[in-house]
Amino acid sequence: MEKKIISTKQIARYPIYLKHLKDLKAEGLEIVPSPIIAELMNSSEEQVRKDFQAISTSPGKPRYGRNIDDLINDLEVFLGYNKLKKALIIGVGHLGGAYMNYRGFASFGLNIVCGFDSNIEKTKEKINDKFVYPMDLLEKVIKEEKIEIAILTVPKDYALDISKRLVNAGIKGIWNFTSVDLDELKEKVAIENVNLASSFALLSHKINSLK
Amino acid sequence: MEKKIISTKQIARYPIYLKHLKDLKAEGLEIVPSPIIAELMNSSEEQVRKDFQAISTSPGKPRYGRNIDDLINDLEVFLGYNKLKKALIIGVGHLGGAYMNYRGFASFGLNIVCGFDSNIEKTKEKINDKFVYPMDLLEKVIKEEKIEIAILTVPKDYALDISKRLVNAGIKGIWNFTSVDLDELKEKVAIENVNLASSFALLSHKINSLK
DNA sequence: TAGATTGTTAATCGATTAACAATC
DNA sequence: TAGATTGTTAATCGATTAACAATC
């Protein structure tokens, strides 16, 4: 089987497909034709078909569409939701604390093992049943627990130094919620930036366009 | 002057340019040539020039580059950071609460006026000096305070109904942190989605590619 | 069979990259 | 003047959209 090249735009769409498919399944649907999905995605049936072809293990059936269970399974396998991954949260401030409590990560197969914070006061009580450790235990915990992913929610002055420690300790991916540029590490670790400033710029521009 | 078409990708880049330019200014730089910026952005000098040309009010100078203060000012005007905009946070849970406390919004020109929550207990004390009001005051506050932007951090079952109320009350833009599809409202209001599932899918894919 | 939906191949569109003349 | 950087125009690249034959 030939491996298809999958663009970042496609990858960003797959979780949205999955959400819609689960909704349709909950409504009792068993077979989904691409025009139905295109409608929900505000896209075209051609794009839906190409996207599904790229990740599906079985072909669609002309005149019917695709089996919804197969498709959900293919998407979950592609997205890795079926494989459990251990993660930790670095910086248990307002945002980090919110993510300690967020239940939605479990649906990605993401298991938040614990948090880390440089403030000793924060390490004195559990959040959502998870320990918050002091920073000097970082390397030890990553290695012993075989943690793969770090959710980075620290103040920006600490972001780069801590990221280097994460890489050296064996972290495979950094989900970067700071505004700091970590690109110098991207040969050694997967980095995904969540940039509120970019997102807000898009909102502003849309507001101005609507006027 | 002819208006240039600016793509969403460009718009997402502008806040990142601004950050780098402010860093360079802090280091004492007064003139920036595009190769320097391209290096920081991990992009090409051609792209940098095109991006700046699209939003700048003055041309660059061959052999010198561009004046850093002019550029910062042009970017801030384009991004609307110089215009104060009132916003409110709907749903003061973990994430909404974190955003009530987040200081970074001020740099976008965003003034978080207050929060709203359906839980009466939450309305009894201020967060970061801001009131949390019960939901039945929503329309009144939006109109009296002339609020433009809503930051939506409610549980997903409430997202669509509340969004309709926001639109009817005159909100211009919804920054949607829920996983709910609000596209049916997009003719009436600007909507920008922050989708953690898509972002995480990109991280996972990068991790798998590095292996 | 007829027709809806599939998958493939070709055309279009848009963004990035390259080439190069203009200029301080 | 020489040369670095600009802005413009052309070429390339990639993703989306369109066209259409295949098929259940």
Image (tube, coloured by chain):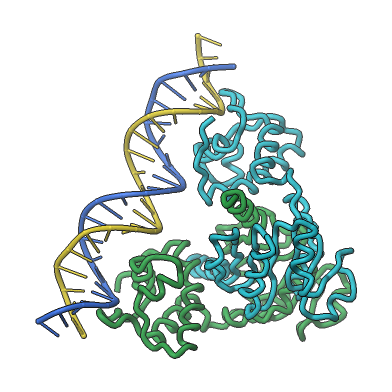
Chain colours: A cyan, B green, C yellow, D blue
Q: Is residue A77 left or right of residue A4?
A: right
Residue drawn where x is 54% and y is 60% of the image = A187
Give the x, y percent position of residue A28: 76, 34
Residue B153: percent from left, percent from top: 73, 65
Tell me the residue at 53%/51% (across/down).
Answer: A8
Q: Nearer the viewer, residue A96 or B39?
A: B39
Q: Nearer the viewer, residue A86 or A211?
A: A86
The N terminus of chain A sits in image quarter: top right
Residue B157 visible to the viewer: no
- The reply, left or right, for residue B153 in relation to residue A114 is left
Q: Position of residue A101 (x, y in %)?
A: 81, 64
Name which residue lies at 73% across and 62% down: B162
Give the residue at x 89% y 63%. A129
Seen in the picture, residue D1 relative to B120 is either above or below; the reply is below
Res A167 visible:
yes
The number of numbered discs placed on residues in the rendered structure image is: 0
Residue B159: percent from the left, percent from the top?
Answer: 73, 59
Q: Between residues B132 and B171, which one lies in front from this camera angle?
A: B132
- Viewed as shown, does residue A35 lie left or right of A29? left
